[in-house]
Each structure stands twice: as C-alpha cells, then as structure tokens.
Image (tube, grey):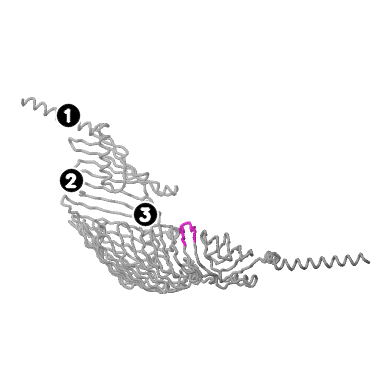
Amino acid sequence: MFKKFLLFLLGLILIILVAAFVLLFTSFGNNILKPHLQAQIDKYSPIPLVLDFFSLRFGGFDIVLKSSDDINITSHGTFSLLSQNIYLELNILLKNPLLKTSPTATPKELLIENVIRGKITNFEIHTVSNSLKGEFRIDTNIVNFKPLKVIANIKDLELESILALLGEKPYATGEIDVVANIIGDNNLKFNGQALAKVNNGKISKDLVKKDFGVNVPDNSFIINLLANFDDTKIAHKFELLSSVGNINSTGNTIIKTLRTDSTYDINISDLSPLTPIVGMPLRGEFRTNGKVIGDSKWINLDGKSDIADSATSYSISLQNYTKPKDATLKIKNLKIEKILYMLVKPIYANGLFNANANLGNISSGINGDYDHTMNGTINGKVVKSEFDMDMPNMKYNHQANINFTNGIGKLNLDLITDAANLNIKDALLNVDSLGISAPYKIDVKDLKKLVFVTSKELKGSLIAYGDVVWTPISLRGNMKSDLFGGTLDAELNNNLISATIKDMNTLSILDMLQYPKIFDSTINGVLKYDRQTQIGNIDLISTKGSFVDNKLMSILEKTLKFDGTKEVYSNIKIDGVINKSLVTANLNMQSNNTSITSNNVTLNLDNDDINANLALKVQQYELTGIVSGKVANPSVKIDTSKLGKDILNNVMKNPKVQQEVQKIEDKAKDMINKGLNNLFKR
C-alpha cells in the first residue's frame, strides 16, 4: 500500500514538474503566461507598455516591450537556476516625439544600454549611452534588491536634447553635468555625494515669443544641486541662479522613511522665462518662501507671498506627494490689475481681491469653507479694444462664499455694478462632476447702461429670476419676468432659446426699444432662437389694438378724411424669421373698415433700418405704401395714383350723381336737336 502511494506521489511530482516546464519553458506555456505578464505590466508601469514579444526557455529569455512609437525596450539574457548566475542586456530606445511634427528635429533617438551581471541576490548594472553628445555612464551595485553603490559620471549632456526626447521644444539650452559616488549597506545607510549642474543655461527668447507671445529679456542661468549622504540622511542644497532671479532650497531627508524638513525661497523679478515650464504666458515679479515637511506618505507646504502686492499665506498638504488633502489660504488686498498683468491678460479691471479658504479631504469629498470679495472698476476703454463693446467705466462690488460638505458646495454670490445687480442664493456646486445648479435674480435699474451687452440702447428697468443648471457638457436654464404689463417665460436648452410672451403692452415695448409709439395693443407670442446658428422665428398675435397718431394715420386723414386711430383691430398676426441681425416678417391686421398687410418686412437690428411694402384697404379704397429708413423716424409714402380713379369711379356710381348726369345728358341732347332743327329750317 505504501509502495503504491509512493509511486503515485512520484508520478504526481513528475506531472507537476512537466507541467511547470511546459508552462515556463515552451512557446505553448509562454503564450499562456503572456496575458498574465501584460496584466502585471499594466498594473505597475508608469507609462502604457505592450508586451510585444515574450520567450522564456530553460537558461534564457527574450522580451520586447513597446509604448506607441516612441519607446522600445528589448531584453535578452541567460540565467542558471542552480548557480543563480544571471547575465542580461536591457536596451531602451527613446525616439524623439517631435519627429512626428518636425522631421528635422534632433536628436532622432536616444539609446540607453544596460548590462546586468552577477547573481540574483548580488548583481551589477552598467548603464551607458553614446547617442547624445557628452559622456553618460552609471554603475550600480544591487545586493538583496537594495542599491548599495552608485557611481555616475555624466558630462556635457545637452539640455535641449533631453527636452526634445521628452517631447518638449528646445525652450532652454545648457550643459548637464552629474557626478555621484554613493556607497551604502543593507541597513540603508549611505555615504557619499551627488552633484548635478546645468551650466551656460539660456531661455530661447525667439521660441517663447513665437509660441506664447511673451517678450523674454536677455537671460542666463545655472543650476546646482548638491546632495550629501551621511549615514541615514541626505542634506541637500539646491540653487537656480539667473539674471531674472533666484530659487533656493535647503534641507534634510531621512533615507529610510523619506522624512524631510526643508525650506525654499523664490525671488523672481521677471516671470517670462518660466513661461514654457508653466505652459502659459507669464510676466512680472513673484516672491514666495516657506518650508516643506513630510515623509513617504504625506507632505506639507507652508509659505507666504506678496504676489500682486498682496499679503498671502498658504498651507497645502498632499497624500503620496500627488493627492491634495488639506489646504488653508488667506489672501489680503491682492491687486487685480497686477495679477492680470502677470497672466498677460488685458487690464480690463482694477481693484482689490481678498479670499479665505479652509478646506479638508480635497481629493475625496471636499469639506470646508471658502469666501472672497472683489471691488474696483471695470476699464471701459480696454473692454472696447479687446471685445469691441462700448462699455463705460463701471464700478463693481462682488462677494461669494461656499460651504463644502462631502464634495457638494453651497454657494451664495452677489455682484453689484452701476448697470445691474446679480444675486445667487443656495446654489449647489458638485466638485466631482463640476456641475452647478443656481437660482438667480437679476435687477437692472437702467437698461441704457447695458447697451454694451444689448448692442442697442434700451429704456427702463428689468427684474428677472430663474434657475441655471450647468455641466461641462450642457447648459440649461429658465427666466421669468413681469414685464410691460405682462409676463415673459423663457427657457434655455444648450443653444436653443424658447420664450413665451403673454399680455404685454405694445406701447411699453416700443418705449423700451425707443421706437415711435404707433400702436396700442396687448400681444401674446412665442420666440424660438438658436444661439449657435443665430437663426430663429417669432410668432405674435393680438385680438385688440388701435393705432395712435403717426405719419401713416395723418396721410389717411388728409387723403381720405378717415380717422384710422378710431379703428379697433381684432385680428393681428405677425410671423417672422430671425437670421442673425436681420428679421424678416409678415404682417396681417384686420378691422371693420380697414386691413393692412405686408410680406417680407425687413428690420435690421444692427442699424434699426426698416423696409416694408404695405397693402392698405380703407373702406372701399385700396392703397399701397412704403415704409423705409430708421425705425425712430421712418419715411412713409402712399401711392395715390390709383386712389384718384377709385374716388372718381365711386362718385360716378352714386345714384344722385347718376341722376344729375342723366339730366345733363338729356338737356344736352335737347339743345343739340333744337340747334339742328333751326339749322335745317333755314
């Protein structure tokens, strides 16, 4: 029985060994392992890599990894399971990503060659590269998977070449030198020194001007980074010394825990050379200083600054160096015109900005409070030159506060200006989705002051209220207003506007538009408009209305002795199409004694020009007319050539006139007959 069990156990072990051999050292097994290896690469690689080729044999292997077209990693080598000796070559080929858009970019590629030899628990890595100008060599000794010795010698490496291989244009030039000689032990105690330098550094004035539109002064810079390894800690000293300012940092870091205690000081007289680093145009001066405390799990920055002549203090903590956790901020009397200047923006406003923030759990359901105030003056001349809006200098006063609870902020906001006031109360801001839902109220005391928005001077006041819901992919809202004796209800769905007009008085509307008050009525209607295409349509109706004194009524009075102002129009309809600034409409008005119709009436909203061909019927008379020119004082012409014939025809159709005509005709006949008789008697 024991013999059978022993044979079974040996057979099972043999099967497992064969299966393991097949799985590990055959193409069939490699194909099974490949997806699992790819999953581990996806999990741990800082950049996307594809396992293009994988072959593991008894005593050797070959691997090819690729990342798009820019990175190609190949490795092949030998190993011994018994002696644990390893030898492998690992080559990393970095292609210049700028070649995709600029075929003449240099260098074309960078090849980093690594040779790894020794035992699994004690091996050396020799790294060299001959692809770039200068010298590049690093030797590393790894014992029990811990680096115990690093010797580096890099000399005269071109900074612009490194930038190019990182996909950046050569905004800066210079030579990089690195010298390091560091020796350690298994207890992570290190001694030695590392020194990195950038010599003869310059920022390209022409390239920054071309790409960012910023003028960079003549400049030069050097960078020094000295790291002294003393047993369990590193003491560092960093300095960037330039013709436009300096950046300095000193401090100590515990190697095992990465516990750091450092200070920094930044004093820049002109930010423009830093434009390519930040990725946006900058200029002006900037100063800040503070300290950095933290370890491998968190880090905290505490500092102060006089940015834009302010008194600013800040404290920011990060988890794992990347995730914001807590932040406090206090900004006092920041000059808005100076921050606009620093950001290379038009100085369309000046004033003071103050803010306070006390926020926690920023990366996972933010909590805390934020508030700010702004007051100053909007510069009308700059707004005109930059946005072509005829805006006067306008004072403003703005304040806002937000209370965050688990990623949802409750926002209250007030904006008071010479032209209008805006109030938002208890709006909801979703930090994760960046969506906002805001009830609002707008109070315009004098519409004339909003001519820079309306493009036409309007008269009167306006109070409107509603809700706005905004997300990064949609905008919806509504507005209600008691206006001109009636109501306005409007809705916005992304680019589409629909508005319903109810019981509005035409005299009030014409007065607001500063058009002649020619017609008194109560109208209802619907407006639809697409903000993107600037095309829409309008339909207006009224069941009761009358003309007031105007040029057309005066002409009818003089011509026909007809008082058109006494007519009540019970059926009025206007339908039109809006195409940008041009409105084309049809008009149909009916009363007991008159009708007025016109097709394709045009109204240019930019210059207030109107052009309308009228067809009028007054009692039994038909007339045509033309209304043209400025709406405020149009030219009205009536064609009376047909009117004379119509009047004569109507006179001749009168029975009394016909009787008199008949008498005249009979008398004429008698006189003619008597004359003829007397003539022939002679």
Asked if the stretch drawn in magenta spans residue 534, the answer is yes
Q: For the residue carrying disc 3, how many other residues have a C-alpha within 10 Å: few (<14), some (14-19), or many (20+)?
A: some
Q: What x and y, as percent, mark residue 199? A: 35, 58
Residue 200 is at least partly visible in this image: no
The residues colored magenta run 525-539
Q: Quadrant of residue 204?
A: bottom left
**Tag 2 residue:** 144
Q: Is residue 417 above or below residue 89?
A: below
Where on the picture, by quarter, is residue 642?
A: bottom right
For the residues marked 3 and 2, what is the alpha-carbon distance in whole angstroms?
35 Å
Q: Circles 1 and 3: CB distance less than 8 Å?
A: no
Membership of 284 in magenta stretch: no
Residue designated by label 1: 15
Residue at which label 3 appears? 159
Q: Quadrant of the N terminus?
A: top left
Q: Earlier in the sequence, mark 3 or mark 2?
A: 2
Q: Nearer the viewer, residue 651 or 674?
A: 674
Q: Is residue 2 left or right of residue 127?
A: left
* Alpha carbon separation for disc pair 1 and 3: 58 Å
Q: Position of residue 336 (x, y in %)?
A: 37, 70
Q: Main secondary structure of the magenta part?
A: strand
Asked which secondary structure carries label 3, the reply is helix
Left or right, residue 99 beside residue 437: right
Given this view, does label 2 or label 1 mark the residue nearer the observer? 1
Q: Which mark is residue 111?
A: none
Dot 2: what SS? loop
Q: Is any atom of residue 20 visible in this view?
A: yes
